[in-house]
Image (cartoon, rainbow, N blue to C red):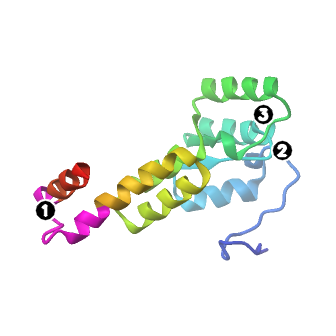
């Protein structure tokens, strides 16, 4: 069954189990990707995420849990889930550093897009976006923007402003 979304070829796997890993079709779909790093979020951190992450980690997957993309029933439940996930070896993160980790280099078109998203959702990041855009302007003006020396000169010029 296909699910209408921003990823049109994504397979929708209906399930009633709290932990998605308990659904054979889900587990097999993940295995077919060949990837060993998984990013997880869910309706509740203490149930959906924890019960899916635990068996995946036991199978050798590296699981990143995006805490601010998941909800919790209450603060105590979330803290218990965070402790449990940490003990089982999950990597806990939030959307902002995860985006930067996936991107790896802000000096790309995607990087400029991510900085725009940051500045829209995190007011303090507007200064970073402005600095990046200023530096980018000088890099574009550089005759040989591929050389490390030209890049450093452009950043030095940007810092002087």
> In the picture, residue 143 is in which quadrant?
bottom left
Residue 89 at x, y percent in the picture? 57, 30
Q: Earlier in the sequence, mark 3 or mark 1?
A: 3
Residue 158 at x, y percent in the picture? 25, 55
Q: Are marks 2 and 1 in contact (CB under 8 Å)?
A: no
Residue on which the image places disc 3: 46
> In the picture, residue 81 is in which quadrant?
top right
Q: Over which residues does the magenta segment extend?
A: 136-150
> In the picture, residue 150 is in which quadrant?
bottom left
Q: Would you call the spot at circle 1 few (<14 residues within 10 Å), some (14-19), or many (20 or more)?
A: few
Query: In this orientation, which residue lies closer to the viewer: 12 or 28?
Result: 12
Tag 2's secondary structure? loop
Residue on which the image places disc 2: 18
Q: Earlier in the sequence, mark 2 or mark 3?
A: 2
| In this rendering, position of residue 45 left or right of residue 85 | right
Quarter of the picture containing the N terminus is bottom right
Residue on which the image places disc 1: 147
């Amino acid at each position: 069954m296909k699910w209408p979304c921003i990823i049109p070829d994504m397979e929708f796997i209906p399930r009633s189990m709290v932990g998605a890993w308990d659904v054979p079709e889900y587990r097999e779909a993940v295995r077919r990707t060949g990837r060993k790093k998984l990013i997880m979020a869910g309706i509740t951190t203490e149930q959906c995420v924890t019960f899916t992450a635990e068996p995946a980690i036991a199978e050798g997957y590296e699981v990143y849990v995006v805490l601010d993309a998941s909800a919790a029933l209450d603060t105590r439940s979330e803290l218990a889930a965070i402790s449990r996930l940490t003990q089982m070896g999950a990597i806990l993160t939030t959307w902002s550093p995860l985006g930067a980790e996936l991107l790896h280099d802000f000096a790309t078109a995607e990087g400029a897009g991510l900085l725009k998203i940051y500045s829209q959702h995190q007011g303090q990041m507007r200064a970073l976006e402005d600095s990046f855009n200023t530096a980018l302007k000088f890099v574009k003006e550089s005759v040989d923007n591929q050389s490390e020396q030209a890049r450093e000169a452009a950043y030095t010029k940007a810092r002087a402003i």
